Structure formats: structure tokens, C-alpha cells
Amino acid sequence: MPANKLVDFHAAFAQKYKFRVPIHPRNLAQVIYPYQGYMASFKNREFSWPEMVEVYENQIIASEAKASGRHLLSNELSCFTFWDLVESKNKAFFTFDEMKELMQAFRFDHVQTQEDFMKEFEVTLRAIPGELKEKHLKNGEGVFRFDLARQIFLKRTVSCTLLFNFIKL
């Protein structure tokens, strides 16, 4: 299934089949909602049925955490769901190209170069001294850890939550 067809697929599926999936609306929004829809925002990516099922299983677990009041854990699990879609070699870190793919899914489309990344996330990086060494980035040896992606995701999630609450007013 091409990523850019996920929203249409879900709409067609929901019209034909009625069933209850125990996913919190926020977690579902992170998968397919037009203004978040991180899974649907992957560029030039197709998902297999097992990958889609795994995303839903992970989001059900994240939703359970959210329903029990553990919102931070829920968002961290949700971030891991999208990280895991990119991370295929079980090496626990990303190269810049892999991180760029994840950032585009998180709707940071303007992050095309490492310089763009450093500029966009300057405040986040300042809060984590030594996270990315500039000399390593210049040599293409930068290591982008899950913790950095998690922090970026959490800030994005808080921004989206504030926006949704403002729209409801």
C-alpha cells in the first residue's frame, strides 16, 4: 500500500467494514489524520499488510498506556512505531538519510540537509550537549539516536495537541 493512499484506503475500508479498534483518537490521528498522519506522510514508501498490522498493534499498546493516564509513555511508544518503520537493520541508530525519512514522515519536509536539521532543531540539540558532533556530521558519520527522534516527536505532539485544543474552541 503506497503511503500516500493510506487515508483513502482507511476511508474505503471503514465504509465497508464496521468494527471497533481500541485505538485512542490521538494515536489514530498520528497514523492517518490529514494534519498529522505520520504514517501516511512517508515519502515514496509502500507498506506491506504485516507492517500495517504491526503499526496498529503498537498503537493499540500506546493507546492502552494513554487510557491509563500514561500520556508520555503513550507518545514515546507511538514514536517508536514510526522509528521502527524506518529502522530495518536493528542497529539502534540512524544515518542522516534515515533520520531525514523519519523527519519527513513527522512533516518536517523542509529538512533536506544536515544543515537544515541543525537549524530546525537547534534548541532541542542545545538541550542535549554532545548529541551530534559537528565534525562527525561533516564527515557523514553522524549518528542519530532514537532519544533525539523521541524528543523531536514529543515536541511535535505537544504542538499538535495545543493546535487541536485551540481549534476546538
Image: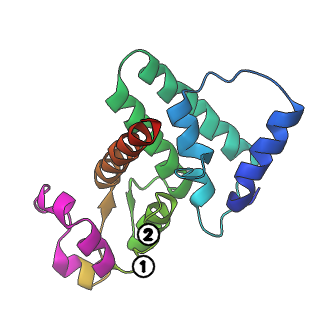
Mark 1, residue position: 112
Q: Secondary structure at mark 1?
A: loop
Q: Quadrant of the C terminus?
A: top left
**Mark 1 is on which residue type?**
Gln
Q: Quadrant of the N terminus?
A: bottom right
Residue closest to the eye, 32 or 75? 32
Rendering quarter of residue 69? top left
Relative horizontal placement of residue 133, taking residue 116 as reference (left or right):
left
Residue placed farthest to the right in the image?
16
Q: Where in the figure is residue 2, as x and y percent of width and height?
A: 74, 60
Q: Secondary structure at mark 2?
A: helix
Mark 2, residue position: 100
> Looking at the image, can residue 88 be seen?
no
Q: Residue visible at 56% across and 41% down? A: 29
Q: Is residue 122 magenta?
A: yes
Dominant secondary structure of the magenta stretch? helix
Q: Residue visible at 40% across and 46% down? A: 160
**Mark 2 is on which residue type?**
Lys
- Distance between mark 1 and mark 2 Cα atoms: 7 Å
Q: Where in the figure is residue 10, as x and y percent of width and height?
A: 75, 43
Residue stretch rendered in magenta on the structure: 115-136
Q: Residue visible at 72% across and 42% down? A: 50
Q: Where in the figure is residue 117, as x and y percent of width and height?
A: 31, 72
Return the disc, 1 or 2, that comes first in the chain's sequence. 2
